[in-house]
Image (tube, rainbow, N blue to C red):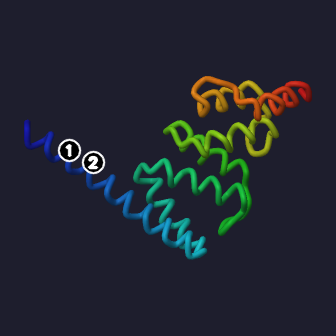
Amino acid sequence: MNNRIIFSVLLMLSSVCFAQSDFDRAEHLRMKKDYEEAIKHYYIAFESGSPEAAHWLGAFYYDGVGVPKNAAVAGAYFYAAANAGVVGSMVYLANMHISGNGVSKNCKKAEEWIRKFSNGSMPLAWVEQIADCKEKI
């Protein structure tokens, strides 16, 4: 029984190491502006469980860098990353829900994401955007 536990832990650690290795490679390629190759490694890291890789895939699809621009695909990646705690993806989702770009226009969801990345508060910089969002519905 102990051998199974040890094997399971080693297997889990090895997948984390591979994800980190691909993520690090993707970061290096992104810095060199080799976006198409970076995306391949981010995708492998994402498939291995890297929420940061999901964030970067979302950013590439949102901006159309190295891939065709697709806000809906970006939103799916941002959701994966945000649900794993990546603050940058929470910010993207708040903005996307305010504008309705790639996800449903939903002021309540935007506010939920804002409060999540702001530890429950509503920063003054966002108050007006949420008010405008609610006004336009």
Residue 99 x %, y %: 82, 40
Which is nearer the eye, 94 or 75? 94
Residue in view at x 72 percent, y 63 percent: 64
- Dividing the picture into quadrants, the one containing residue 106 is top right
Residue 59: % across, % down: 64, 55
Question: 23 above or below 87?
Answer: below
Q: Is residue 29 left or right of residue 131?
A: left
Amino acid carrying label 1: it is: Ser
Q: Is residue 90 above or below residue 70?
A: above
Q: Which residue is mark 1?
A: 8
Residue behind mark 2: 12
Is disc 2 placed on a helix, strand or loop?
helix
- Residue furthest front as drawn: 124
Instruction: Label 1, secondary structure: give it.
Output: helix
Q: Amino acid at mark 2?
A: Met
**What is the spatial separation of the Cα atoms under label 2 and label 1, in whole angstroms?**
6 Å
- Categorize mark 2 by other alpha carbons within 10 Å: few (<14), some (14-19), many (20+): few
Instruction: Determine the residue positioned at 79% across, 34% down.
Output: 105
Q: Nearer the viewer, residue 9 or 95?
A: 95
Q: Is residue 44 above or below residue 130?
A: below
What is the residue that sits farthest to the right in this orientation? 136
- Name the residue: 44% across, 61% down: 23
Q: Is residue 15 above or below residue 68?
A: above
Neighbor class of circle 1 (other Cα within 10 Å; few <14, some 14-19, many 20+) is: few
State which quarter of the image contains the C terminus: top right
Label pair 2/1, CB-CB below 8 angstroms: yes
Residue furthest left as drawn: 2
Query: Seen in the image, is 59 located left or right of residue 98?
Result: left
Quarter of the image that includes the N terminus: top left
Res. 32 image quadrant = bottom right
